[in-house]
Structures are given as structure tokens and as C-alpha cells.
Amino acid sequence: MSDTTLLVFRGDSIKTGTEHAFPVPVLEGMVVLDAIHWIQAHAATDLACRWNCKAAKCGSCSAEINGRPRLMCKTRLDEFAGEPIHVWPMRAFPLIKDLVTDVAWNYQVNAEITPFTPKTDEPVPYRMAAEDVERVFEFRRCIECFLCQDVCHVLRDHDQKAAYYGPRYMVRIAGLEMHPKDTVNRTALLHREAGIGMCNITKCCQDVCPEHIRITDNAIIPLKERVAGRYYDPIAWVGRKLFGSKPESTESNLHLGRGAS
Ligand code: SF4
Ligand code: SF4
Ligand code: FES
């Protein structure tokens, strides 16, 4: 058994909180969340952290480890052999205490998106082409860890939460828009409230996704193309006039008390 040192942020404000050093005994296979639990059991019983599954599936244990947004339960200590390990809360959201942030804004955004809406007489079970199932399934792998939201500079550095839903919700909208049995058109929502134009395709979100969802390549870029076709393509405009299009999402489910936080 060897020791490593975790430098863990403690406090209820990023401005006034500080890192505390905790030497932790290391066993083979330990992850950062194990080390945090060891600290809670032996050195700082009031250290706040959020977790649930310890299996990289609940999305609760998101933090910034040596400056990179990661799941604590999926980050092994032996990756950092000989280096100090800095563990900080996500910086894009208001801090509650220590490693716990208030991610409620994300759920408010989620409530603004018209959910899956099949035809009322759509036969069940749904019959879909295998390639359609596969395309939509990628987006359904999201565990709502919000690491992509945390790294997105639009939300994190510019705090444009009133103007952009963020990459997690581009993924959700892509999963709905590309579902062959869905009947709603969310292009106007993307263009206006969701603010897809704010994304400049830096791909940082895609790089941190623990589910390896190709957020920019498979969700954001195709959605941007839909918005461009809807608002800036005169031939598509004529096509819609002649042949119609899916009904757009209504305003009734928008602005359910969401505000920038
Ligand atoms: S690609 Fe877009 S959504 Fe992803 S981090 Fe960059 S600006 Fe944000
Ligand atoms: S898209 Fe990936 S990074 Fe973003 S919330 Fe879902 S699982 Fe987490
Ligand atoms: S504890 Fe569930 S994802 Fe880490």
C-alpha cells in the first residue's frame, strides 16, 4: 500500500474556499471516489460530495480532476502516479458545498423541450429500421452527468445560460428530432430559445463525454444544418410552402420559470 495526496476543494464559495491536502492510502484499482470516501471516513466526515451508483451510470459524481471535468468513480488513482490530484467541483454551476453544485438549471431547460410525440394512432410496438434505432440510441446513452455543460465555454466562461441550452440538450433534441416516429419540429426552438447558433463547434463537450456520445459530430452539426436549411435556404423555404413540414413545438411548454443561474 502506498500513499497519494488529494488536494480537495472545501468551502461554500469558489472565491473564499481553499484546497485541503489529504494523504490517502492507495489500494490497487482505487478510483478518485474511493479516495473521497476514505477521506470522509477517516479525515473529514463533513466533506460534501454527490454520488450514487459508483458504476459510471448515474451521472452524480461529476467533478473537475486536475482541471478536467470527469466522473470521480471512473477516474483511477494510478493514472496520476507520483502527481498530486486536485479535486474541484464543477465550475459552470453555483456551488453548494465542497464538491456539490446546484445543477437545477439543467432540469429547467429540459422542461422546455417538447417530449417525444408520436401520432396518436401510431401502431405499437413501433416498427423502425435498425439504422434509425442505432442513430437515436447513441443519444439515449446520456447519463446527465453535465460534464459537457461544465466544459462548454458558452456556459462556463461567458455564463450565457439564458441564451444557450448547452450540449446536453442538443443531444436530447437530436434524439427527438431524429426519431422517425416523432411528429414535432423543434427547429424554431433550436434557433430561438435553445440558441444553437451560440455553439462554435469547438468539440470540447465531445471530448469529455464519459458515454462517448459524438455530441458535436452527430447531434450539434446535423441540428445546425436543419436550422440553416429552415432559416437560410430559399429552396428549402419553397419546398416547405409547396409540401408543408412537421408542426413546430408550441410555446406552451417554454419558459417554465427558467432563468440564468
Ligand atoms: S462544441 Fe459547442 S456545445 Fe460543445 S463545448 Fe464547444 S461551444 Fe459548447
Ligand atoms: S452528453 Fe455525455 S457529457 Fe453530456 S450529460 Fe450526457 S453523458 Fe454527460
Ligand atoms: S457515482 Fe454514479 S456516475 Fe459516478
Image (tube, grey):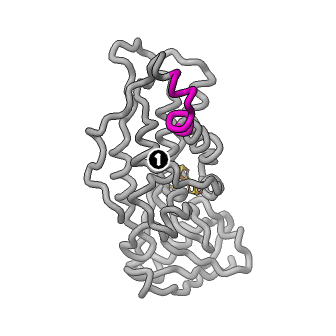
Which SS class for mark 1?
helix
Q: Which corner quadrant holds the N terminus?
A: bottom right
Whether residue 110 is visible here, answered yes or no, is yes
Q: Amino acid at mark 1?
A: Tyr
Check disc 1: other Cα within 10 Å, few if <14, some if 14-19, many if 20+: many
Residue nearest the viewer, comparing 18 with 156 = 156
Location of mark 1 (residue):
169
Quadrant in which residue 129 is drawn: top right
260 left or right of 257? Answer: right
Judge whether 178 appears above or below 244 on screen. below
Query: Residue 143, image x and y in percent?
Result: 50, 48
Q: Main secondary structure of the magenta part?
A: helix
Relative to 161, is 23 above or below? below
Query: Is 251 placed left or right of 144 in the picture?
Result: left
In the image, the segment drawn in magenta is 227-239
Residue for point 37% across, 80% down? 12
- Identified at 38% across, 31% down, the residue is 248
Q: Ligand 1 sits in which quadrant?
A: bottom right
Quarter of the image with the C terminus in it: bottom left
Compared with 251, 184 (above or below) is: above
Nearer the observer, 62 or 214: 214
